Image (spheres, rainbow, N blue to C red):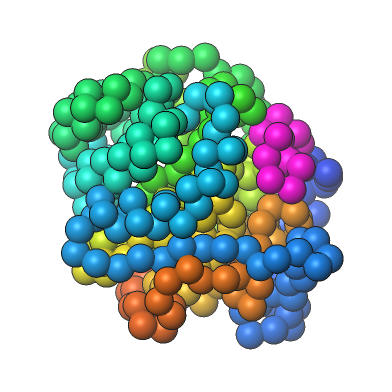
Amino acid sequence: MHSDGHSRRQFLKHGLYGGAALLAAPSLASAGCGEAGLSVTPRRTGAAAARVALTAGNDRADMTFRALREFRTEIAAAIGNKTVVIKPNNVSTSIPLCATHADNLTGILEFLKSIGKDGNVMIAESCAGGSTLVGYDNYGYGPVAAKYGARLVDLDQMESEVVGCLDERDMRPHPTRVSSLLMDPNIYLISATKPKTHDTVVATLSLKNIVMAAPIKPGGRSEKRLVHGGGVWAINYNLANLAPRLHPDLAVIDGYEGMEGNGPVRGTKVDHRICVVSPDWLAADRVAIELMGIDFATVGYLNYCVQYGGMGEADLANIEILGPALAEHTIKYKLSDSSGTQQLWRQPIRGQTVGEP
């Protein structure tokens, strides 16, 4: 079981069909829900604030290690005897700026070693395009994995199961093959990614790193396109609808360098020198959005996750920052050239041209 009682195998209360109503309804942001497009209450009455570690510096591995150290006891207890799966973000196999850096993995693995949880660790990915194993070689993961005894895994070569993803062009669920490993409740799943702007959903962070890796490429044919769902309404909905079963147990957002502009692959470098870590993935993504200078109300799938409820904390007033003030390290990232049409998710899908970009 995950935090707040969610299991990866548990469907959302309203399911795929009920979620279609979400696409047909006005967005949170357009409902007058406050400055950030949200009206968020704490997950539990009287609960302590969610905690997010923020570090800054000039050593990527060290920043990662220091941020993780804030949750040393909590992480060790949560792992227990589970297999640890580290999911990097390798959208392309040949563009280093878009991919998780080997030094970020070093920081995570060194931390796991420091708490005695390095004995059963996988690094697992399904690259969006190309061979996952080629990407591992290109990005220097082999020596890091060998040093710490971690296994390099290609999710495309492992077992899968079927979930339904909405396609807004016909408003029907389409069977989508996703990784059984990432949906296994008996693993401890770490999302290791960078803060990047995105050409369809504004920004990609810890949640999207997990959800978009889950659809595999059987026979070289990618199932990831099915999560995209034919447009901005469906991709935002599908990401949120899969989140309860495919979210990370631990978010590690390596902002030593970020990507702005036409991400998640063709953007440009932001020299940011930060790292964000939290066992509350939604709180980590919320803090990272703030550090990128992006209006949270514009990120559809994260707003949907808040609307569904119980996935984590998204109200900055309820998030305790362990480290420097956010304002000291906020950089306004340039958005994608398609950022205007990305906001169509905030309008009801009815009355729109189906499949409109």
Please tell me which residue lies in front, 8 or 47. 47
Would you say residue 291 is visible in this rendering?
A: yes
Q: Is residue 357 above or below residue 190?
A: below
Boundaries of the magenta span = 1-11
Give the image quarter of residue 297. bottom right
Residue 164: percent from the left, percent from the top? 67, 32
Instruction: Identify the residue shown where x is 35% and y is 77%.
Output: 329
Please tell me which residue lies in front, 349 or 95. 95
Residue 345: percent from the left, percent from the top? 61, 64
Give the prevailing secondary structure in the magenta stretch: loop
Please tell me which residue lies in front, 312 or 203. 312
Residue 85: percent from the left, percent from the top? 45, 30
Q: Is residue 186 left or right of residue 22?
A: left
The total number of labels drawn is: 0
Q: Is residue 2 magenta?
A: yes
Residue 46: percent from the left, percent from the top? 81, 68
Q: Where does the N terminus fall, quadrant-wise? A: top right
Would you say residue 332 is visible in this rendering?
A: no
Q: Is residue 275 left or right of residue 95?
A: right
Q: Is residue 181 above or below residue 51?
A: above
Q: Is residue 116 magenta?
A: no
Instruction: Identify the residue shown where x is 46% and y is 15%.
Output: 158
Instruction: Identify the residue shown where x is 30% and y is 68%.
Output: 56
Give the image quarter of residue 125. top left
Please tell me which residue lies in front, 198 or 88. 88
Q: Is residue 281 above or below residue 141?
A: below
Give the image quarter of residue 118. top left
